[in-house]
Image (cartoon, helix red, strand yellow):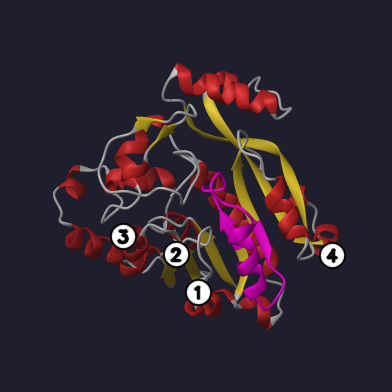
Amino acid sequence: MTDAQHGGPGAATVGGARAATAGGMTRFDKTYDQPDPRAYFRALSPFAYQTPGHAQRVFRRLRRALRTGDPATESLTVLDLCCSYGINAALLNHDVTLDELYARYTSPRAAQLSTAELAEWDREFYGERRLSDAVPVVGLDIAANAVAYGRAVGLLTEGFAENLESAPPSPELRRAVRRARLITVTGGSSFLSPRTFRPLLSAARGPVWVAAFVLRTTPYRAIAECLASFGLATERAVPTFPQRRFTSLREQRYALDAVTASGNDPAGKESDGYFHTALHLSRPTSDVVATPLDALVPAV
């Protein structure tokens, strides 16, 4: 599930088409809980959805920064919220780009395969490209089919189809989260609240960093305040990141109005035809002082 639609883990269904919401954004809900990721990439390709590609560069830097030589951090686990089919895990742990994934899953060869055949093809593909510094990734999403696919092809070490906005985490999820040192979000913040983050941070045994790419149309204050209660200071990176092209003038008007109402300037960003995200990084204060945010965020 991603903010390519409206946010994240809120309304996965099965099917194919997109439809405009009353709020002004186009939803791609029916691509998020398919048996495999082909419909997802076919639907988003025309609109150049690119947040996971930006996140790949950031999350790899965060992984390196967290590996300090301490055994507790050398074995760090990543918890990816709204993980969908394990796309962030694919990009974090494998020698592959987002453009290559688009080409792969929209290719004539992929179109000819059954889901089982695609999964076998993917297991071999990712197995050959796995990096030597790969880390375990735990995935969390309400889309059970997507999570199952990410696990089946080896992208997700563990995966959980749970909605923490409506129910507490299972004992199994709490156990998996104990090892998490980095929580990532590239889509879904529109549907997330402290109800999701509070039990996850409570379950983690050590200091955790939270890295979230948040649409500029979406407030993040409530989540940042929740993270602050766990001793995490939230910084917002200066550069913003193009997310995807608008599907219509109506959608662009929605974004322009929402960004302006939040006190931000859409000039050169939403006014140029793209949603934009801002990276919010939450860390213990000692880490904020030790490693400036600018050193962790590559130029756009």
Residue highlighted by disc 4: 286
Q: Residue 41 vs residue 132: left or right?
A: left
Q: CA distance from mark 1 to mark 2?
A: 9 Å
Q: Nearer the viewer, mark 3 or mark 4?
A: 3
Residue at image point 52% right, 48% down: 188
Tell me if residue 188 is in the magenta stretch.
yes
Judged by depth in the image, the label closer to the viewer, 4 or 1, is 1
Between 20 and 282, the residue placed more toward the observer is: 20
Farthest residue to the front: give it. Answer: 166
Name the residue nearer the viewer: 5 or 85.
Answer: 5
- Residue closer to the observer: 62 or 95: 62
Q: Position of residue 283 (x, y in %)?
A: 75, 60
| Residue bounds of the magenta highlight | 183-210
Which residue is labeled 2 in the image? 162
Query: Which of pointers 2 and 3 indicates the residue nearer the eye?
Result: 2
**Disc 3 secondary structure class:** helix
The C terminus sits in image quarter: top right
Secondary structure under the numbered disc 4 in the rendered image: helix
Q: CA distance from mark 1 to mark 3?
A: 17 Å
Q: Label 2 amino acid?
A: Glu
